[in-house]
Image: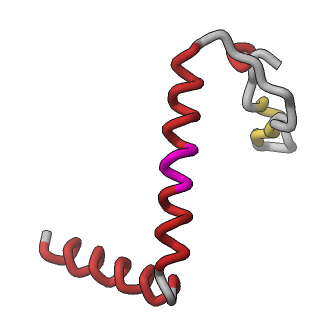
Amino acid sequence: MQIEKFKAGELRQGIGYKYFFPSTINHDWLWNDVGINKLIEEASFELGQLNTFARLVPNIDLFIHLHITKEAVVSSKI
């Protein structure tokens, strides 16, 4: 499927309301823009770094909780 022609979904009419019905995304994707290749490569690299970092942290739940707490403190200072 050409990524340029992809349609995320459509609005459908219900009884008294409209709703969004998403399209399936399980396709073999094709694109002509080489910039997309660079973005995918960079995203893959960053995900790999995040995965490596997550393996080094002994208790990831505690790590996440500490960052949530830090964000709350910084937000309250605003």
Q: Nearer the viewer, residue 25 or 45?
A: 45
Magenta stretch in the rendered image: 44-48
52 left or right of 16 in image: left
Q: Quick check: 5 above or below 61?
A: above
Q: Position of residue 32 (x, y in %)?
A: 66, 10
Left or right: where 78 falls relative to 13:
left
Q: Is residue 13 visible?
A: no
For the C terminus, give its image quadrant. Answer: bottom left
Q: Is residue 49 above or below residue 25?
A: below
**Quarter residue 68 falls in:** bottom left
Observer able to see residue 3: yes
The quadrant where residue 44 appears: top right
Of 32 and 24, nearer the camera is 32
Q: Position of residue 56 (x, y in %)?
A: 48, 77
Task: Please tell me which residue lies in front, 21 or 63.
Answer: 63
- Residue 37 found in image quarter: top right
Main secondary structure type of the part rendered in magenta? helix
User: Image quadrant for the N terminus?
Assistant: top right
Residue at image coords 69%, 16% = 31
Residue 10 lies, with reference to residue 61, above or below; the image says above
Could you say where residue 14 lies in the image, as x and y percent from the top left? 85, 41
Q: Residue at x 52, y 66 (%)?
A: 52
Residue at 86% over, 44% down: 15
